[in-house]
Amino acid sequence: MYHISSISILLEFLSDTLSIHVVGHLPHLQQIFRYLPMNADGRLFTKLGDIILTTRQALKTPRKDIFTHLLASDRETGLIMTQQDLKQHVLLTITVGAHSVSTTLTRIFAVLASRPDVQARLRQELNDAFDGDGVQPIETVRSLKYLEGVVKEGLRMFAPLVGGTPAVAPKGGITLETGDFIPESTQVWIGQHVVMSEERYFPRATEFLPERWMDQDAEKDGKGNQLIKDRRAWIPFGYGTHACGGRALAMEELKLIVARIVREFDICFGQEGDQPFKYDEWAESWKDFFLTVIEKIDLRFMPRAELRSEVGI
Ligand code: HEM
């Protein structure tokens, strides 16, 4: 319950507050910003984070989750996180964990509504692999190449962290493959969306092409893939030591949910009054508040007739 309410409060907070991207590029302002009073949504979101943390700390469970690791002491130094650090991690995990997956899913479903051909090919793959409805074995879900292509292409085009995340150049600076030198301590923002929209890495970058991710043998042969010029440019989860801590979980969540919904429902746009839905206008309304904030969308999920008869409904 706290989880759901904290997400909606977070959204209010994000849309009311100064974008992290503005403050993020001004390190000195960041120092002042943390002392400014928070608005009501921010205070409520923080309070919910406290409640979630104390509830989790009181929970005696052998089940391992992300907090099993955060609450444990560091193996090398023996240090444990302060309550303040843990609070920040709760807020971060709710923010990046739930909001990223939900906005990615919404946009994948919108794209599927606009691309019946992709939806049909995906459904065919799912029908060939599964019997009946309901939850399917994760091992089978993992093996589905077109499903993987849909999810990867969704993450490429709809990176939830549009403007990227910061990294600091190491001691002595760093020389990039391009020959450019970045002096030490310089803060650099890596814009996931910009990189993943580049034609030189992903030809036909503005098109949603799940098959882009299927021709991997060509890459292994060193011949390259016509639709991927540099696989390293796929960075929806960031890169390196501080890459997304929930990457594997997020990929499985996205695949499982997309598989289940597409197998059981036909997805199409609803109607806004008498007007057909305008995908491009909707895309224009997305806003970058560090995480993408998207407008609501009217999608219809129609139970599939043949599946109903298959399972005897
Ligand atoms: C579509 C889904 C998701 C995307 C695209 C995504 C993306 C990202 C990105 C770009 C970062 C920053 C990495 C960097 O600084 O270079 C990040 C950090 C993080 N994410 Fe995710 N994320 C997703 C889902 C999740 C989920 C489901 C969880 C866990 C429940 C999660 C937990 C984290 C954590 C803990 C960090 C901080 C890692 C650190 O600073 O060491 N994320 N995520």
Image (cartoon, grey):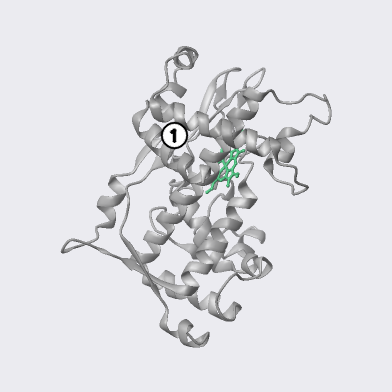
Q: Position of residue 153 (x, y in %)?
A: 49, 56
At x 47% / y 47%, what residue is drawn?
200
Q: For mark 1, what is the residue?
A: 290
Q: Is residue 98 above or below residue 171?
A: below
Can you name the residue that lies furthest to the left here? Answer: 274
The three-letter code of the residue at mark 1 reads Phe
Taking the image in four quarters, ligand 1 sits in the one at top right
Q: Position of residue 188 (x, y in %)?
A: 52, 26
Q: Is residue 179 visible?
A: yes
Q: Is residue 13 above or below residue 31?
A: below
Quarter residue 173 falls in: top right
Q: Is residue 269 left or right of residue 253?
A: left
Q: Is residue 16 left or right of residue 151?
A: left
At x 35% / y 34%, what residue is drawn?
15
Q: Is residue 58 above or below residue 169?
A: below
Q: Is residue 204 visible?
A: no
Q: Position of residue 312 (x, y in %)?
A: 50, 87
Mark 1 crowdedness (10 Å alpha carbons): few <14, some 14-19, many ≥20: some
Secondary structure found at label 1: loop
Quarter residue 233 falls in: top right
